[in-house]
Image (cartoon, rainbow, N blue to C red):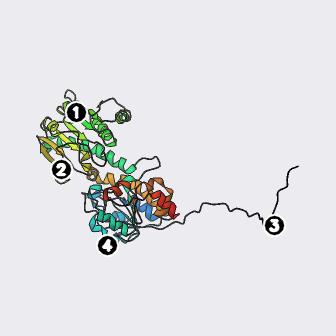
């Protein structure tokens, strides 16, 4: 005989509440777009078309006077879609969200407001500990847009800028091979009966792949070097043709460089710095009038003879070899680059408003969290914390403790 359960008079049945998702209240954002004056920057992070969508969704957008002129977007283009044109830079920085196409610089720190959200690229070589300290003291949420991931786990802005840099590098090289730019007068693709130019690409990432596709499209002979067999295989599969590929063997590389008309440096950085794989001796053995385009110059360059140049004075000669070493190549085709950046950032801003603010979006979107390097007084990016000797705080743990 089974025992009956003992029910005490103090025992009570209390229904458990079902936990329902709380739909966040939409938030109207005030977005400021300042005019960039540093880093040879011509891009603007939001195009007039993107601003039109934001205004239609109830957000306020302020654009500094002439902020878009480098991309051939004018004040009238923005005012016609509902943006407010501002002539005082300080007024732009009263916005709750600041979106920039160039990194934050010291002059802007005094203009920043407490608890602002800043979306911009970062440039580690130019960052200083004092800048980070000031951003931390103002409890700013800072997001590096090149570190934002999409739902596929890729970096959409980096990919777009890499494609632009790769394609542009071949067009730049073709320009400097011509007599107009005091080159040796070679048509990159050749014609019937005349062999094409020889293009050597170091690096088989997105930049190298885009450069190879552009060079092959123009009819050049292409050879690609990289130490990753996987990247070399992926490049061949993606460009749908077989081309010369090799690991970075110094002897083979030196031999191929000596006959190349164009050499493109497109290596990925290692620990933030691009490894130098082409020595000065290799460059000295290249043909007179050949062209080097070092796309990797942003992170130091992969040619020993490279040194940073500007869009105003883009080239110099060493051993009669023309060197083009301009950082931020996408800024030379600023309108295309601006549209690419805007295509990524505009949906993020829309999602921010629908989520009830950037804090809620960061909680719900892992890809956005990946770009956050400062969160309300804490450094949430391990390499930045280590470089400047700040305490590192894991953003996921920080959000969990606040929830």
Question: Do tag 1 and tag 3 residues touch (Cβ < 8 Å)?
Answer: no
Q: Which residue is mark 3?
A: 9
Between 129 and 241, the residue placed more toward the observer is 129
The residue tagged 1 is 250
Tell me the quarter of the picture where residue 240 sits: top left
Q: Secondary structure at mark 1?
A: helix
Q: Earlier in the sequence, mark 4 or mark 3?
A: 3
Q: Is residue 242 above or below residue 293?
A: above
Q: Nearer the viewer, mark 4 or mark 3?
A: 3
Cα–Cα span, label 2 and label 3 = 88 Å
Image position, residue 120 (x, y; %): 35, 59
Question: Which residue is more in the foreground, 67 or 357?
Answer: 357
Residue mark closest to the camera, 1 vs 2: 1
Residue sticking out furthest to the top: 193
- The numbered dot on residue 282 is none
**Quick check: can you spot residue 35?**
no
| Label 4 Cα neighbours within 10 Å, binned few <14 / some 14-19 / many ≥20 | some
Q: Is residue 50 left or right of residue 270?
A: right
Q: Position of residue 334 (x, y in %)?
A: 29, 54
Please give the residue where the numbered disc 2 appears in the rendered image: 314
Instruction: Give the residue at x 11% y 40%.
Output: 320
| Mark before the other along the chain sequence, 2 or 4 | 4
> Can you give x and y, in whole percent of width and height, for residue 372 in the image?
41, 58
Q: Secondary structure at mark 3?
A: loop
Q: Is residue 98 above or below residue 236?
A: below
Q: Determine the CA span between mark 4 and mark 3.
A: 69 Å
Residue topped by disc 4? 90
């Amino acid at each position: 005989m089974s025992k009956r359960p003992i029910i005490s008079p103090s025992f009570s049945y209390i229904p458990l509440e079902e936990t329902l998702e709380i739909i966040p209240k939409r938030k109207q954002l005030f977005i400021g777009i300042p005019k960039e004056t540093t880093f040879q920057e011509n891009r603007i992070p939001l195009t007039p078309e993107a601003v039109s969508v934001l205004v239609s969704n109830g957000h306020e957008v302020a654009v500094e006077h002439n902020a878009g002129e480098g991309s051939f977007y004018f004040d009238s283009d923005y005012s016609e879609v509902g943006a407010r044109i501002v002539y005082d830079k300080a007024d732009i920085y009263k916005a709750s969200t600041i979106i920039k196409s160039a990194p934050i610089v010291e002059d802007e720190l005094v203009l920043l407001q407490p608890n602002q959200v800043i979306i911009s690229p970062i440039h580690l070589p130019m960052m200083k500990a004092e800048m980070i300290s000031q951003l931390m003291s103002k409890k700013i949420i800072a997001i590096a847009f090149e570190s934002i991931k999409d739902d596929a786990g890729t970096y959409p802005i980096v990919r777009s800028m890499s494609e632009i840099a790769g394609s542009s590098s071949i067009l730049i090289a073709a320009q400097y091979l011509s007599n107009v730019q005091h080159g040796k007068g070679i048509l990159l693709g050749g014609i019937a009966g005349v062999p094409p130019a020889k293009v050597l690409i170091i690096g088989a990432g997105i930049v190298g792949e885009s450069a190879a596709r552009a060079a092959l499209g123009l009819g050049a002979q292409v050879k690609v070097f990289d130490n990753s067999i996987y990247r070399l295989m992926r490049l061949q599969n993606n460009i749908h043709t077989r081309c010369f590929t090799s690991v970075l063997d110094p002897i083979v590389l030196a031999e191929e460089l000596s006959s190349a008309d164009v050499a493109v440096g497109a290596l990925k950085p290692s620990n933030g710095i691009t490894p130098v794989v082409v020595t000065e001796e290799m460059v000295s053995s290249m043909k007179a009038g050949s062209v080097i385009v070092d796309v990797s110059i942003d992170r130091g360059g992969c040619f020993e003879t490279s040194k940073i140049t500007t869009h105003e004075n883009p080239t110099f000669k060493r051993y009669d070899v023309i060197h083009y070493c301009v950082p931020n190549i996408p800024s030379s085709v600023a309108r295309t680059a601006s549209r690419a950046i805007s295509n990524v950032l505009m949906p993020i801003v829309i999602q921010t408003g629908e989520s009830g603010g950037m804090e809620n979006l960061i909680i719900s979107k892992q890809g956005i969290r990946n770009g956050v390097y400062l969160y309300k007084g804490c450094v949430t990016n391990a390499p930045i914390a280590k470089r400047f000797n700040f305490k590192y705080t894991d953003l996921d743990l920080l959000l969990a403790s606040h929830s």
